[in-house]
Amino acid sequence: MPDRLKILILCTGNSARSQMAEGLLRHLARARVDVASAGVAPTQVRPEAIAAMKEIGIDISTHRSKSIDVFTGQQFDYVITVCENANQHCPVFAGTNRRIHWSIDDPAAVAGTDDIRLKAFRDARIELRKRLNQFIKDEITG
């Protein structure tokens, strides 16, 4: 088995998509990855993101939003951006082997009732899980 891959997942606020992706990848790939997430303009982890992940048994309630600046100078095997803003403003990480971009709809931008908003977070979680499972198949387990 190869060494643990170091992966950074980025979005704008590090409040939903990147946080859910971090939790999912850590859960799905287990000991094969060291994964972190950050934002180009960090805010706070959305309670809907925590709730959507809790529904599938993944606890991200202790996660905190971090600035991309925290990771300046670090090397990653992969940098994955999950929104257009992060893709456009992602700095170059020297030594990073591969950069991947996925455009995932922002669940935090959905207005409406609690149920409507939570559904948007569930939809983002489902899309992220699908992409991460394929990533693991293609890039980690071969």
Image (cartoon, grey):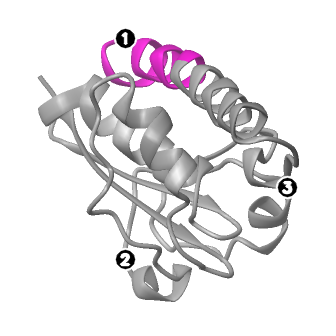
Could you tell me if the residues under marks 1 and 3 are in contact, i.e. CB atoms within 8 Å?
A: no
| Residue 132: in magenta span | yes
Is label 2 or label 3 in front? 3
x then y, percent, for residue 33: 24, 41
- Find numbered disc 3 in the image and state the secondary structure of the residue it sits on: helix
Q: Residue at x 42, y 35 (%)?
A: 53
* Residue 127, image quadrant: top right
Cα separation, mark 2 vs mark 3, equals 22 Å
Q: Is residue 41 left or right of residue 37?
A: right
Question: Residue flagged by tag 2: what amino acid is it?
Answer: Gln
Give, as a single range, the part of the protein colored magenta.
130-142
Determine which of the numbered discs, if any, sits on residue 74 in the image.
2
- Is 25 above or below relative to 12? above
Question: Residue flagged by tag 1: what amino acid is it?
Answer: Gly
Cα separation, mark 1 vs mark 2, equals 25 Å
**Is disc 2 surrounded by few (<14), some (14 to 19) or many (20+) residues within 10 Å?**
few
Tell how many labels.
3
| Residue 105: in magenta span | no
- Find numbered disc 1 in the image and state the secondary structure of the residue it sits on: loop
- Is 103 above or below relative to 63? above
x then y, percent, for residue 55: 39, 25
Q: Residue at x 52, y 14 (%)?
A: 134
- The N terminus lies in quadrant: top left
Could you tell me if the residues under marks 1 and 2 are in contact, i.e. CB atoms within 8 Å?
A: no
Given residues 63 and 35, the one toward you in this image is: 63
**Is disc 1 surrounded by few (<14), some (14 to 19) or many (20+) residues within 10 Å?**
few
The residue indicated by pointer 3 is: 84
